[in-house]
Image (tube, helix red, strand yellow):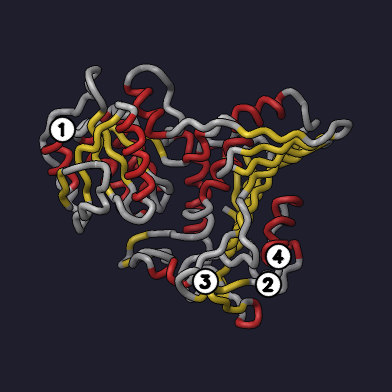
Amino acid sequence: MNTAPASVPAAVPSAQGPLPVVLAGARGHGRWHLENIRRLQAKGLVRLAGICELTPLTAEELDGHGPVEQSPDFAALLASTGAAAAVICTPIPTHADLALTAAERGVHLLLEKPPAPSYAEFQRMARGVATAGVACQIGFQSLGSHAIAAIRELVAEGAIGEPMGIGAGGAWARDEAYFRRAPWAGRRRLDGVDVIDGALTNPLAHAVATALALDGATRADDVASVETELFRANDIESDDTSCVRITTTRGSTVAVAATLCAERPEEPYVLVHGSSGRITFWYKQDRVLLQRAGHGPSEVLYDRTDLLENLVDHLAGRADLLVTPESTGAFMRVVEAIRLAPEPVPLPSGAWRTEPGESAPRRIVPGVDGLVAAAADTLALYSELGASWALSEEVTAS
């Protein structure tokens, strides 16, 4: 996609009528954004002004939107449509450049996670956005959940006693076709450019970001150190089975374990440990379970604020932005630790098996579901839990 700079007046959202939006990347996960824009368009909040794709969407793919201007040239499309905001859902290595292309033109942003493949690229993007004075929302949808504030309040009130750390677990399944969906899929770098498409940096990145948010450690300088253990059962470059343990500058511990090779995939969750109880948050469902001494279990479903809708409200002066670049600095410190860690260790052939998947075979690591749960429960790394394939792995800290 062409990101050549051009001199274009800043796009300012009008107080009259819906906000004109350009979507960059409308296939794959971008289809979710296309549907969400359709939903907000029906509410009169936004108008799909253009789609940036290398191959134009068909009329069938655009069903419900009508004729929409399309172009592979992002900068030109922003200019020709007069877009006030852009949703960027493109390959990870393109995020920073496309965000800056929009910012230079005064176009506000919803930028998909991870916002960049390295901390340096993240800083470059964040500086450019701040200099341009545009609003930038990072697409961690789970951070729009009203459960986040509710859990923080429960912890502050002492509902589970003294905080004892936060764990998170994600046991998912992805078949071999998932790693062939795009040239950058399952890669740590491509043509000399960082990608870092690992389990904890992309598909289960929400587990990391949500755990850090519940701990209150969201800024880059909130992170003191990150320990990493990265493995792969699939024939890929990046990790598909990994864990990290983050120590914050105030001494709290956040441990996150993930796999894309689960035996029985389940909803990912964050677990807040206390001296007299625990809170489990299934962040994709906005579901919270409170368990504490002297009380029966209590489960609550919370509402969620959509991040594009929040961006629209922010531009209209009705709300603060929920997920700023600054508030994802800690997450990017974890991405950077994974980027700088030794290459993921391939699991021995006896540590995994192959079964039929949805569209292709998938690799399963027996026992990994329990390891993920144990890591979230104990804040331990795979090697500390006795996983035979992890015992020889050297833990790295940064």
Locate residue 358 relative to residue 292 in the image: left or right: left
Describe the element under mark 4 as helix, strand or loop: helix
Choose the circle earlier in sequence order: 2 or 1. 1
Choose the circle earlier in sequence order: 1 or 4. 1
Describe the element under mark 3 as helix, strand or loop: loop
What type is the residue that disc 4 sits on? Ser
- Do we see residue 378 in this rendering? yes
- Do we see residue 396 in this rendering? no
Whole-angstrom CA distance, mark 3 to mark 2, is 16 Å
In percent of width and height, residue 340 lies at 49, 59
Nearer to us in this view, 380 or 283: 283
Whole-angstrom CA distance, mark 1 to mark 3, is 44 Å
Name of the residue lying farthest toward the bottom: 349
What type is the residue that disc 3 sits on? Gly
Q: Residue at x 67, y 73 (%)?
A: 389
Q: Are marks 2 and 4 in contact (CB under 8 Å)?
A: no
Whole-angstrom CA distance, mark 1 to mark 4, is 53 Å
Quarter assignment of residue 352: bottom right
Choose the circle earlier in sequence order: 1 or 3. 1
